[in-house]
Image (cartoon, rainbow, N blue to C red):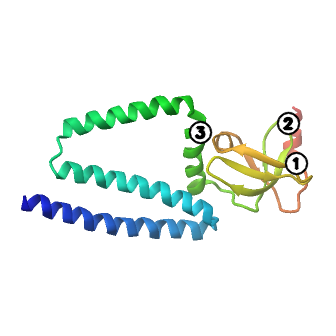
Amino acid sequence: MQTKFLILLLLLVLFFVSRAGIQLFIQKVVEMKDAPLTRKAMIKKFLNTAHLAVFLFAALVTMGIDYANLMVFLSSTFAILGVALVAQWSILANITAGILIFFNFPYRVGDRIMIVNKDFDMSGVIEEITTFHVLIRRDQGELITYPNSLILQTPVIKLPEHAKSLPQKAEQLESD
């Protein structure tokens, strides 16, 4: 009993130390990428929830909860969530893409971009990057809402700030 208590105490200390490390990591990434506070809050909530789930699982196993029964419960829960999320696959894909965009997207709010699309002019200034989509303001004032999952799959060109239209080479490529 004393060993379990010490392990739980160690897990609790490790939880708070690693939580502080996660907060520092998020703060550094946000400062480096100059991300808005709403993006910071979304990423912070997601990472804190995943962090808590890992430590709760470790604590339950440490307390002697039957591992087999716990796995049956977790697999049943994930199966139900999986069936529910398959119906909303695009939502899950956009949330995952939103997290990837936060850490790896080479463009930030205020950058002028062009999404390569042969049918429509998809150029403008990135106004916001949200959990589900990127908001792009065109020069004519229209707001384009582009899903995160698609922006990761589509070529994106960063335009100079003063450019109002497609670069010359891109126009030639699209006409071919």
Name the residue rendered at 85%, 34% in the picture: 119
Above or below, comparing residue 30 to residue 81 in the picture: below
Labels 2 & 1 near each other (Cβ < 8 A)? yes
Badge 1 crowding class, 10 Å Cα cut-off, few under 14, some 14 to 19, many 20 or more, is some
Q: CA distance from mark 2 to mark 3?
A: 31 Å
Name the residue rendered at 19%, 61% in the picture: 8
Chain-order first, disc 2 or disc 1: 1
Name the residue rendered at 33%, 69% in the picture: 17
Chain-order first, disc 1 or disc 3: 3
The C terminus appears in which quarter of the rendering? Answer: top right
Amino acid at circle 1:
Leu
The front one of 99 and 13 is 13
Closer to the camera: disc 2 or disc 3?
Answer: 3
Q: Secondary structure at mark 1?
A: loop
Chain-order first, disc 2 or disc 3: 3
Residue 171, position as x, y percentages in the image: 88, 42
The circle on residue 166 is 1
Q: Quadrant of residue 76?
A: top left
Closer to the camera: disc 1 or disc 3?
Answer: 3
Badge 3 crowding class, 10 Å Cα cut-off, few under 14, some 14 to 19, many 20 or more, is some
Q: CA distance from mark 1 to mark 3?
A: 31 Å
The front one of 55 and 156 is 55
Amino acid at circle 2:
Glu
The N terminus appears in which quarter of the rendering? Answer: bottom left
The circle on residue 91 is 3
Amino acid at circle 3:
Ile
- Residue reaching furthest to the left: 1
Q: CA distance from mark 2 to mark 1?
A: 10 Å
From the image, tell me which residue sits under label 2: 174
